[in-house]
Image (spheres, helix red, strand yellow):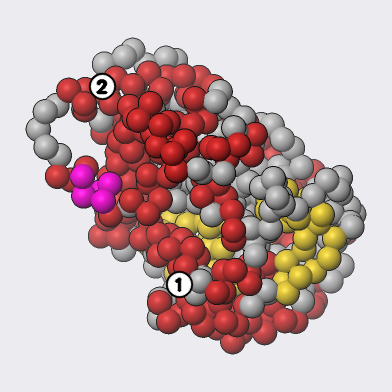
Amino acid sequence: MKRRGSGILLHITSLPSRYGIGDLGPEAYRFADFLAMTGQSFWQILSLTPTRPASGNSPYNSSSAFAGNTLLISPELMPDKEDPVPSFQEDRVDYPEVISYKERLFNRAYKRFTEDKEYNYEYERFCSENSGWLEDFSFFIALKAHFHGPIWGEWPHEIKNREPQALQVLKKQLHNRIEREKFLQYIFFKQWFSLKRYCNQRGIQIIGDMPIYVDYDSTDVWTNPHIFRLDEEKRPSFVAGVPPDYFSQTGQLWGNPVYRWDILKESGYAWWIQRMEHNLKLFDIVRIDHFRGFIAYWQVRAGERAATRGQWIKAPAEDFFNTLLRHFPDLPIIAEDLGVITPDVREVMNRFEFPGMRLLLFAFDENLPASPYAPHNHVKNCVVYTGTHDNNTVKGWFEHEASQDDKERLFNYIGKEVSSQDVHLEFIRLAMMSVAKVAILPMQDILGIGEEGRMNRPAAGKGNWQWRLLPGELTPALIRRLQKMTEIYGRA
């Protein structure tokens, strides 16, 4: 982020596609063209890791910190797509229907791949270069299917504890399923890196999300239990969350196992270096979710029903980031620093010059004059957003969440009253004219969509991650308006 620019937040699942979910196919390339036409420099997406219905299809509760979400594989870029395509709804992702359809497609594609007797050098190279995570992940998914779904902590003792002889027996038994998963990862990453090259060639950098924590029921915890705080039965002894603040009176209990930073430090943070290296291949810039957890994290004893009875535990932030910088001298990360951020977090961000985030939706409360989210208090080294995937849209906020006082402060700030039909344009202008080097606009706010366009409601376990851009919504008029704004405020 060395120059002034702007971009759009739109996850891959939200792209148009006749296959029920946005994917890495032609519409993704058309969206990259749209970004280039409007003078954008960035495309921000969410995490690309696998999703699953048991976790509400969230990209932040994944079975792997390294694998790709195979639901994003484009059937149009696969050699065999002969099945009739069901009549999927265009505006929402119907995950059960999509999963059912794509599983049939994937099974046939893998069968055809195994019948091709020619040696595939590209596939073998992919498996070799990614063996550090690919073998364990593919085995983990095969085991999940073999044991019919329970979390790995409930698997038979010898498998849970990775006894070599028992694992070897099941590897032979599940060979075909393991190879199928490796094949699908190969297809996913082949399609992803092709799209990324296309974007980079058009001057578009990809910003991707990396959550700080991983899910307990993941290959990462199963294969690396020593770096997490687990008990003798390999269940979490402490879990992650955040204490009560002005977002939640009871705090948030996420349930992810917390790290053993002492063990990580002894290894030179090997697992984190591998993870960061992987993400820096996937993305040009990495936004780290819950950055403050690197400085101090809130841990709650497993079994507690609320996050209130926890404590802050310090992490070796300075040593950790100095180690990362020795491996990655140019560490292009964005620190998600929303919520209550203490001075020690700011100190680390300033020392390493990591840009933070400024959300305009948070700017117009009673703290407006001093609010760090208000445009007049922005700094160059930050990223300004109208909102994120966890917030309401601007129009939805205006219609359902903003108090009359909030609206009056907004009107006074911009010097005029606006309606719910136009408020998104004012927020876009505020973001674009900010001194912040980068401005990121959710696609829903560019379109002026209301609450129905919200991507995620953190307190709701169902109905998230489903919103989709409709074909034809990127109109010539919208292109001209966005291009003009980008040019006027020096972000083209």
Residue sitting at x 11%, y 28%: 117
Relative to 276, is 162 above or below? above
Nearer to us in this view, 252 or 150: 150
Q: Amino acid at mark 1?
A: Pro
Residue sitting at x 33%, y 51%: 131
Look at the image and tell me whether residue 260 can be seen.
Answer: yes
The location of residue 452, given as percent across then percent down, is 66, 35
The part of the image, by quadrant, that contains residue 191 is: top left
Give the dominant element type of the magenta stretch: helix, strand or loop: helix
Q: Which residue is mark 1?
A: 332
Please report the bounds of the magenta region as a residue range: 124-128
The part of the image, by quadrant, that contains residue 396 is: top right
Q: Amino acid at mark 2?
A: Lys
The location of residue 136, given as percent across then percent down, is 43, 45
Image quadrant where one finds the N terminus = bottom left
Q: Secondary structure at mark 1?
A: loop
Q: Is 127 included in the stretch rendered in magenta?
A: yes
Image quadrant where one finds the C terminus = bottom left
Residue lying furthest left: 118
Q: Secondary structure at mark 2?
A: helix
The location of residue 409, given as percent across then percent down, is 81, 64
Q: Is 218 included in the stretch rendered in magenta?
A: no
Residue sitting at x 63%, y 69%: 261
Relative to 195, is 100 above or below? above
Nearer to us in this view, 85 or 110: 110
Tell me, for residue 111, which label it has, or none: 2
